[in-house]
Amino acid sequence: MALFVHKYGGTSMGSTERIANVARRVAKWARAGHQVVVVPSAMSGETNRLLGLAKELAPSKSQASYLRELDQLAATGEQASSALLAIALQAEGLQAVSYTGWQVPVKTDNAYTKARIESIDDVRIRKDLDAGKVVIVTGFQGIDDVGNITTLGRGGSDTSAVAIAVALKADEALIYTDVDGVYTTDPRIVPKAKRLSTISSEEMLEMASLGSKVLQIRSVEFAGKYRMPIRVLSSFTPWDIDLTEEATSGTLITFEEDENMEKAVVSGIAFSRDEAKISVLGVPDTPGIAYKILGSVADLNVEVDMIIQNIAKDGKTDFSFTVPRGELARTVEMINSKLVPELGVTEVRSDDRICKVSIVGIGMRSHVGVASKMFKTLSEEGINIQMISTSEIKTSVVIDEKYLELAVRALHSAFGLDNDAA
Amino acid sequence: MALFVHKYGGTSMGSTERIANVARRVAKWARAGHQVVVVPSAMSGETNRLLGLAKELAPSKSQASYLRELDQLAATGEQASSALLAIALQAEGLQAVSYTGWQVPVKTDNAYTKARIESIDDVRIRKDLDAGKVVIVTGFQGIDDVGNITTLGRGGSDTSAVAIAVALKADEALIYTDVDGVYTTDPRIVPKAKRLSTISSEEMLEMASLGSKVLQIRSVEFAGKYRMPIRVLSSFTPWDIDLTEEATSGTLITFEEDENMEKAVVSGIAFSRDEAKISVLGVPDTPGIAYKILGSVADLNVEVDMIIQNIAKDGKTDFSFTVPRGELARTVEMINSKLVPELGVTEVRSDDRICKVSIVGIGMRSHVGVASKMFKTLSEEGINIQMISTSEIKTSVVIDEKYLELAVRALHSAFGLDNDAA
């Protein structure tokens, strides 16, 4: 007998028929003798419907009193889907009970709409599990010190599930979603992309933040901190497939170094189109100049990703960095109106037709020449590299957006990731 | 400065536009210097939508574990509408905060789907009111001793509003609804029906239980116990009508005996079509026979209203009583299968084409001849009276359903209730 936390996304909970299927799947695990805690998202569309109503009443506000009400409102979506799942499980003949975040309680800080979990009381859940019940806990929400409802932000149910798994010392957190695992790259671009049976949490973090939107990144960080294994698997396989088959399907995100010993040097190719490049030319090469430029961008609440400062010539230098594409216009505007007069910049260039491609792999730590193989591969395809950044387990390049597919396919093949059976 | 509790029904909260209008109305009261607590129902249709989803998953169950989940589910409707109203009030420039039943907390027993309020903590609400906030509290729901969500049953928001008014020692509970008050009878039957500016709680209880479905009857009982004045008024007047005009509109349900001194002998004519009559003939006239018959009906969970036992002849008697029309078939079936053989009944007759008409008035206590005036009026119209029952402040008769409108109009006129301006 083992203890599992299942998490089902909004699509899996999208109708009473689908909720009934989730109940049958959970019942299969419970009848096999396992203890199961289920963390469902709101029925798909429900959170958007609720927040849409709020928007009709008050277009946009940032005061805490308003955000508090948004959380009070949005939290109802998971409360309803959790109660419905409990009812569906009871209809399957199981004992089941649903709890909201405050009933557990899941304690968080008071940062409405993006709260962080501080502690989870396991007493109530454990008592019910020991009494033979399936326990359903609303994802996405908690309660602050003084009894206000908080939510964890979009995708927060993943983090809820992992945090509950950690609190209960579960054997594994299973994240049921609409994809069947983590792939070496996006199969829409590379049909030969392979599903990874395991991936290290560090690699997963790099893959997720680079655009493989399978899991909320905070849930992986959380799992890494407590070494909680997470399995990403499909909720669209038939509910009655063999339990052992289901329990080993999808992709397991691991936290054990030695498990990765035999793995490929590069595990996957990530990419992002949400990139734009700004170059500020003719900047005086004085101490603090990087802070002056990047600090001003940070004041706009714009996140800077890659940064390059050229070698200075004649006391002047050039400065390039990337920002999310949607932030390009107002960043350039700020530079023109503020930095150009202040710093005597000679020219500001911007380009929103770029993309970022990255190779990710824990094996890069112990293998040399991985980056140069990347550069060689791109060069052989005639692709010009505009910017480079490296970390211990990834190397990223900025290239012209039109080469994205070509670059990803070439790298996928060069690093031996193609699934030749496909 | 006074303290008011406003309650708005589902129709008044039926869209964001209507919620915005509720907010403007509440803001008018707050800006006039009053403290306001608002108790909204769920948006119209929402509770039915949620319970409909539950029904799709599990057609009908009565276990506590199932009813618990129904409450967990249904309570989300008021939580959402309350948060939306808080947002609408903030958009009006007011400080506003919404609380669920458990956040107040509103403590109830654990009778899921029909819980009773046991206590209400006023500390949190009072603190917010004193800080100048409008406080919104979800209607319809509370929390039991061990942290389960409970609901009070359909129409429970009226009771929530009155209970909160009592806990806060409010000056008045205003129940905003889709009618503009309590009428002397149904204006669809008697166009000359008048709105009553005041009605005693005892009269209101008789009117409500007899079919004037304006208020949940428990809310009036609750108000009576604590002498909390309730005003029933329309939420469909323009929100910006003069505050003094609004504050004196509708019908005030009072608990002060002396206020009724000058009132008419009869305050209103109530009626109900939801009636059926059963006559059990040739019953042995022995002690305990009434208990034997009515006890068997009670065992079916069928509520008996009027009862007549004829004078015995030759050791036999006849027994007639009324039940809700929808319960007629199974009651007759039980009598035929159980009582006929046991008691040697000679005949069982039933009639579902009857109705009940009642005159209600606290003045009947001190005036004689009121009932006989009723009988004379009906007799002059050629209406045969089948059963009669009287209490201190009402007299009810059962008549053929086809005479319902005629009887109500004749009595309305005979007791001087016609609004001659209409």
Image (cartoon, coloured by chain):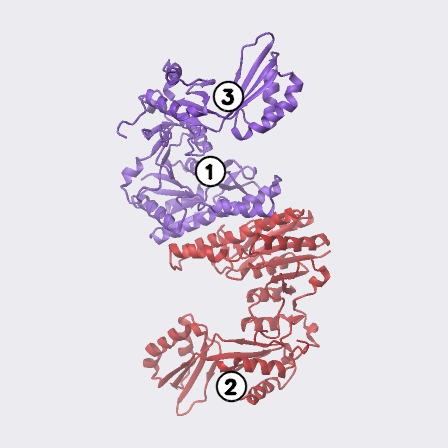
Chain colours: A red, B purple
Residue A222 percent across, percent down from the top left? 59, 64
Distance from the alpha carbon under mark 3 to that under mark 2: 92 Å
Chain of the residue under the numbered disc 3 shown in the image: B
Q: Residue at x 61, y 49 (%)?
A: A86
Q: Nearer the viewer, mark 3 or mark 1?
A: 3
Q: Would you place residue A196 above or below residue A81 in this image? A: below
Residue A311 percent across, percent down from the top left? 45, 89
* Residues at marks 3 and 2 on the same chain: no
- Kind of residue sitting beneath label 1: Gly
Number of residues whose C-alpha sits closer than 10 Å to that of mark 1, classed few (under 14), some (14–19) or many (20 or more): some
Residue B64 lies left or right of residue A338; in this view the side is right
Q: Which mark is residue A385?
A: 2
Q: Residue at x 53, y 13 (%)?
A: B310
Q: Could you say which is closer to the camera, residue A116 or residue B137?
A: B137
Q: Would you place residue B94 above or below residue B113 in this image? A: below
Distance from the alpha carbon under mark 2 to that under mark 1: 68 Å
Report which residue position mark 1 lands on: B155
Residue B414 percent across, percent down from the top left? 33, 20
Number of residues whose C-alpha sits closer than 10 Å to that of mark 2, classed few (under 14), some (14–19) or many (20 or more): some
- Residue A144 seen in the figure: no
Distance from the alpha carbon under mark 3 to that under mark 1: 26 Å
Chain of the residue under the numbered disc 1 shown in the image: B
- Assign a secondary structure to mark 2: loop
Q: Residue at x 36, y 21 (%)?
A: B411
* Residues at marks 3 and 1 on the same chain: yes
CB within 8 Å, label 3 to label 2: no
Q: Could you say which is closer to the camera, residue B186 or residue B19?
A: B186
- In the rendered image, the quadrant that contains the N terminus of chain A is bottom right
Q: Which mark is residue B306?
A: 3
- Kind of residue sitting beneath label 2: Ile
For marks 3 and 1, the one nearer the N-term is 1
Q: Would you place residue B47 above or below residue A383 in this image? A: above
